[in-house]
Amino acid sequence: MRVTYLPRAALLSFAVLAVAATPAAAKTISVSAGAPDANEKLQEALILAEPGDVVELGAGTWTLTDGLSLDVDNVTVRGAGTKDGAGSILDFAGQQGAGEGLLVTSDDVYLTNFAVLNTKGDGIKSKGADRIVYHQLRVEWTAGPKETNGAYGIYPVESSDVLIDSVYVRGASDAGIYVGQSKNIVVRDSIAMENVAGIEIENCYDADVHDNVATKNSGGILVFDLPSLPQQGGHNVRVFDNMVHDNSTPNFAPKGNIVASVPTGTGVLVMANSRVEIFDNMLADNGTANVMIVGYRYPYDDAKYQPLPRDIAVWDNEHGKAGFAPAFPGGAEIAAAMGGSIPPVLWDGAGNAIVNDDVGVLSLNLPDVSTPQSEAKPSPADLKGEAPAPLPGITLPASMEARVQ
């Protein structure tokens, strides 16, 4: 066997590269909730952390008056759990400003195993944070649904590669779990309850939303595309294997918010997106509809915006009771005329969709989104047809998946 020896200079170069690729002194920075200066030490730890470091939150409750921030790449923030009395609890009930509880603006961040409570603004927000992982977190407004609660619980925006896994969110006055203007997203194994919107995917490309529970929200799972945002044309979203039931909390969003128009009792709502698949979900006890497919029917000034839903496919869902308390204008009258309830699937008549579930579909016959809803001519619709080729599943970087194993 022939052995080739590298010159000493080459070996030295490889050694330098190896050191550069791995943080030389990655460390764990432990912060105790019981210390007199715990709040200051926590923010200090987030500021002084270096790539590769772990900021470890001890068990206990922090009573915080200001938001926290992290802008260092490749940092883990890890707590001792999410339960009161045993976990790492960041309580912002006394927050002075209206900002986030925790704001992350760096890449490759892993947030796990702590709770954020009662923020004046959003619970945990990340912006421009690629390859971010939200794992085993709790964000809650403990007094329950109120218009004065923060808007979003878990809130990544303008990011690529987002994983939201095993989180619990309750009480958000907009969306419990919201992903906006992002790409390559997985939301799974999470619970959203008593929010206005349980889970919302807005102006996003390529998302899988699966194995979640959305219950007792105003609307369970929303897939929206809105005008006048930097990223438009939301597409390629799969909503599957979720339990979406009893979304009955009266809508408590502040007036003027787009989600304030979501009818109480909505299961899954698709608005103005393309290539959305809704399959293998359990949908039941949603008073307005188990599935709604609609165009964007509000004023906008954006020549590039496409307000119609396109290529929406619905199949193999299990439907329970629905349509018994439709909360859109004229809904009660339509239900009365149909014997007390409307079909589980509601389409406004705009764009195109295929519904292969063996349940009724009600069309409002409003193909032009400029036509006021008061001119609806509701009638049963048959939307059965051949669905397009299935979308591929989302694959996240192996390094992200490894963190939650």
Image: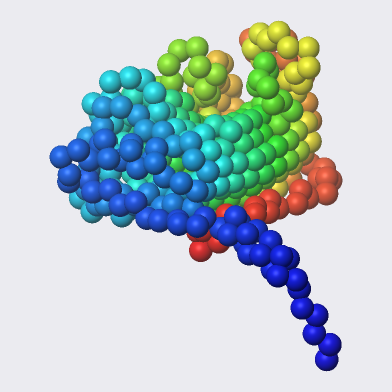
Closer to us: 291 or 119:
119
| Quarter location, residue 294 | top right
Q: Is residue 225 left or right of residue 141?
A: right
Q: Give me the residue at 65% from left, 58% from top.
A: 17
Q: Is residue 305 above or below residue 320?
A: above
Q: Give me the residue at 68% from left, 54% from top.
A: 395
Closer to us: 107 or 142:
107
Closer to us: 27 or 281:
27
Residue 50 image position (x, y, % from top left): 46, 46
Visual colour scheme: rainbow
Residue 232 image position (x, y, % from top left): 71, 25
Q: Is residue 106 left or right of residue 15?
A: left
Closer to us: 311 or 305:
305
Q: Give me the residue at 45% from left, 57% from top.
A: 25
Residue 273 image position (x, y, % from top left): 71, 30
In the displayed image of the protein, which residue is found farthest to the bottom? Answer: 1
